[in-house]
Image (cartoon, helix red, strand yellow):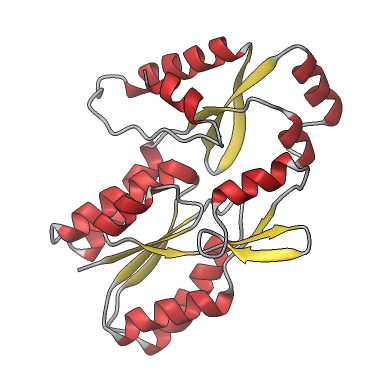
């Protein structure tokens, strides 16, 4: 059976991670001078609380030794594995994993191992990992699972908005002047992920309009395949997520 591994940018709920036996390797989160292992030593609720107190969180890739030890243990056990990484355009995690896997391949030639660039993150990565784990559990071969993961990367969509442009300003994603004007005018950017990079699709005014625009785009993107799994994510705003679901 093929083991599926993800990093902590994957926002698949914990119960589904357990159900499909998906392994997690944590990124590192820095809040001020303190560093934590994401989803191991700190929960996302604590990160939001720090942000409310004006602290800008910083993230960095997993510890190289942690990744090496995990992957090597799979090799020792003779377990084929595929690591689905956070977008290579937004993090060095993909390159780190590729380097580790290349070094292990020299010693463990009989173990199949691969890193797949999700070209995204969050729930989109989670949905890909879940589908891959389902295929692995059904006995699909390593090559078939890897091929289908690449197909899902090509076709999955990320559509989202941000309520407050201030965090995009602090993160350097938009210019300060543009962000301030956007906040004053109640402008909500509709964003998506294109080949691993976050891009603005549209700019609309008002919260209600932004949610309706997301639904409209989702409906359009679904096309002739409406019976699909849709993941809803939120950043400390469950009420809006429920509204969007309705």
Quadrant housing the N terminus: bottom left
Query: Which residue is at 44% across, 19% downward?
Result: 243
Give the side of residue 229 with respect to residue 92, left or right: left
Percent across and percent down for residue 146 are 30, 58
- Residue extending furthest toward the right: 177
Residue 139 image offset from top left, x and y in percent? 13, 61
* Looking at the image, residue 214 lies above or below residue 79: above
Nearest the viewer among 42 and 59 is 42
Could you say which quadrant of the image residue 115 lies in? bottom left
Q: What's the residue at 78%, 42% (across, down)?
A: 54
Q: In which quarter of the image is residue 88?
A: bottom right
| Horizontal side of residue 39 vs 151, given as left or right | right
| Depth order, front residue of 12/129 | 12
Viewer can see residue 13: yes
Q: Quadrant of the C terminus?
A: top left
User: Between 107 and 208, which is closer to the camera in this rendering?
Assistant: 208
- Whether 205 is drawn above or below 6: the answer is above
Which quadrant holds residue 112? bottom left
Residue at position x 38%, y 22% from top?
245
Compared to residue 162, the image places residue 114 above or below, namely below
In the rendering, at what x and y percent does residue 43 appear?
Answer: 54, 54
Q: How many marks?
A: 0
Q: Is residue 41 above or below residue 74?
A: above
Residue 50 in picture, x, y percent from top left: 70, 47
Is residue 148 visible to us here?
A: no
């Amino acid at each position: 059976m093929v083991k599926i591994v993800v990093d902590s940018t994957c926002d698949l709920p914990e119960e589904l991670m357990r159900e499909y036996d998906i392994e997690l390797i944590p990124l590192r989160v820095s809040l001020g001078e303190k560093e934590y292992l994401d989803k191991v030593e700190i929960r996302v609720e604590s990160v939001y609380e720090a942000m409310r107190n004006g602290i800008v969180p910083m993230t960095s890739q997993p510890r190289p030794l942690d990744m090496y030890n995990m992957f090597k243990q799979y090799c020792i056990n003779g377990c084929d594995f595929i690591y689905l990484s956070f977008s290579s355009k937004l993090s060095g995690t993909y390159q780190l994993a590729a380097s580790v896997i290349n070094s292990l391949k020299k010693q463990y030639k009989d173990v199949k191992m691969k890193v797949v660039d999700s070209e995204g993150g969050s729930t989109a990565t989670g949905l890909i990992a879940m589908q891959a784990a389902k295929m692995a559990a059904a006995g699909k071969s390593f090559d078939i699972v890897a091929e289908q993961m690449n197909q899902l990367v090509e076709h999955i969509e990320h559509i989202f908005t941000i309520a407050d442009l201030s965090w995009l300003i602090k993160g350097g994603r938009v210019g300060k002047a543009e962000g301030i004007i956007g906040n004053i005018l109640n402008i909500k950017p509709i964003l998506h992920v294109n080949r691993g990079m976050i891009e603005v699709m549209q700019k609309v005014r008002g919260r209600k309009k932004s949610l309706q625009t997301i639904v409209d785009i989702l409906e359009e993107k679904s096309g002739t395949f409406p019976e699909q799994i849709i993941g809803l994510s939120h950043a400390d705003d469950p009420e809006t997520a429920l509204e969007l679901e309705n």
